[in-house]
Image (cartoon, rainbow, N blue to C red):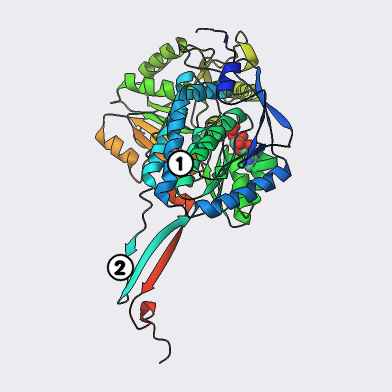
Amino acid sequence: MKTSSPKFNPSALLRRLGLEKINDGVFDGEWGGRGPAIESVSPVDGRVIAAVRTASPEDYERVVQRAQAAFATWRAVPAPVRGETVRRLGNALRAAKADLGRLATLESGKIIAEGEGEVQEMIDICDFAVGLSRQLYGLTIASERPSHRLMEQWHPLGLIGIISAFNFPVAVWSWNAALAAVCGNASIWKPSEKTPLTAVAVTRIAQRVCRETGADPAIFSLLVGDGPSVGERLAADRRVPLVSATGSCAMGRRVAAVVASRLGRSLLELGGNNALIVTPSADLGMAARGIFFGAVGTAGQRCTSTRRVFVHESVEGTLRKKLLAAYRSLPIGSPLDPGTLMGPLIDRPSVERYLAAVREVRAQKGRVIFGGEERPDLPGGCYVTPCLAASRADMPLVQEEVFGPLLHLIPYRNFADALAMQNAVPQGLSSAIFTNDYREAETFLSAVGSDCGIANVNTGTSGAEIGGAFGGEKDTGGGRESGSDSWKNYMRRQTNTLNYSSSLPLAQGIVFGE
Ligand code: NAD
């Protein structure tokens, strides 16, 4: 394992992205923020990158009112014209990709390739949204009444609250905001308080683009603050018809309850406990690579990270050897170094939770085969070695999402048992099977197979293309974002009956009077 000490001065990067030592964290066309400032501390080396002023209750109120006014005009702009603003947003993100990717790395600790990949995801979703801006189709339905037309239309919904997590500091905003914008809405973003700088940088880019196109910049509003001060307000606010919330299951439970109590809509993208099945016919080299990226990529801090591997007992030894070889040669260190494959965890509490989980492996009579230690030789206190554990499906720890690079290896004998164990957790986000057996692959994807929102064959659990609908079942919250028909979440459907006859027949043949 390699160690490297980051020698990187972020001042020039911050300047290029329009950031200063202390930044306003509230945007509604104007910048402000009268709440207390929070420091963005880099997990790369524990140093403060810059500070951001949070939203006060008065800021919150002003932002919502401004966003309402922006919505009132934006909803009447033709959708393809709205798409032009999003097209330019995609281009502006292309131009800023290297800088924004680097800032995402500095703030979240993900390696440069993944930081840039995150910005690429934003660019991709902008392209997708531009196409959508000409395809917000409704159906025409055969009417049972003569000379009647039955049809549906999709109209803009209103204000979209976007609560995002630290591990995808900008991509999740774009999944929501780009679609919301072409659908005619104004969005209000509450980013993670752990990654406020990337949010300010992205909002500055969106502001510039709106200035160019003449769109009201308050369609991309920003409220930096924590869960209680901003997130809870958005959840409780009747003026916000949809709250899209990405984060832990605990947060989702709270947001869902508050939004439901006012009969609002929530779109929940919550925790995962993703499993991968390796069957006797699998290409074990490919499986090992898929598991390795899934378990240690982003230091195990993806919602789709591979956390459990069910491997057939006949190939367990071989797979384990391949994984051990990969784990032993894993370059851990500064994510700013292009040779690094695993950077730090997000902060010290996260490290403590990870180390406690490794202790739990032993307490629950599992066995640590590799790693699970701190790396005090690296700066900032957030680096660890990934942990490979020989576990059992009945260990309570295996039911939980540990948000770090802890992987449970669990042998199985019958395919049906592997499937049952895979599905026997509260979460239902991502799943995968490595097999060359057609029956196993099809069973895995069938109604009696994986119960997750994402199910893959011969590719891992982690990393999804924007073209598909993204999200999961059970405690993962049931939401779908990004591709396919996820745009429908951001619109209200209206069913229209048009009568072009000179009589008034009623539905179901009801005769009323006469
Ligand atoms: P978190 O739940 O701590 O915070 C997420 C966001 O919710 C933050 O912006 C936070 O301020 C806000 N928040 C917290 N309490 C709130 C409340 N009561 N009301 C409103 N907002 C509140 O999560 P995190 O540590 O930032 O991210 C990691 C978690 O997110 C993991 O569980 C991971 O699986 C999940 N995640 C899921 C997806 C997905 O698409 N399914 C994507 C990324 C992350």
Image quadrant where one finds the C terminus: bottom left
* Secondary structure found at label 2: loop
54 vs 91, nearest the viewer: 91
The image quadrant that residue 248 belongs to is: top right
Q: Could you tell me if residue 420 is visible in this image?
A: no
Answer few, some or many: residues within 10 Å of disc 1's Cα (few below 14, many 20 plus, some between 14 and 19): many
Q: State which tag comes first along the sequence, 1 or 2.
A: 1
Q: Is residue 407 above or below residue 188?
A: above
**Residue plotted at (64% across, 15% down):** 381
Instruction: Return the residue nearer the eye: 507 or 204.
Output: 204
Query: Which structural element holds mark 1?
Result: helix
Residue 142: image tag: 2
Picture quadrant where residue 38 is located = top right
In the displayed structure, would residue 232 be above or below residue 370?
A: below
Q: Are marks 1 and 2 in contact (CB under 8 Å)?
A: no
The structure residue drawn at horizontal position 38% and vertical position 34%, both measured from the top left corner, is 465
| Tag of residue 26 | none
Q: Position of residue 363 (x, y in %)?
A: 60, 23
Q: Which mark is residue 85?
A: 1
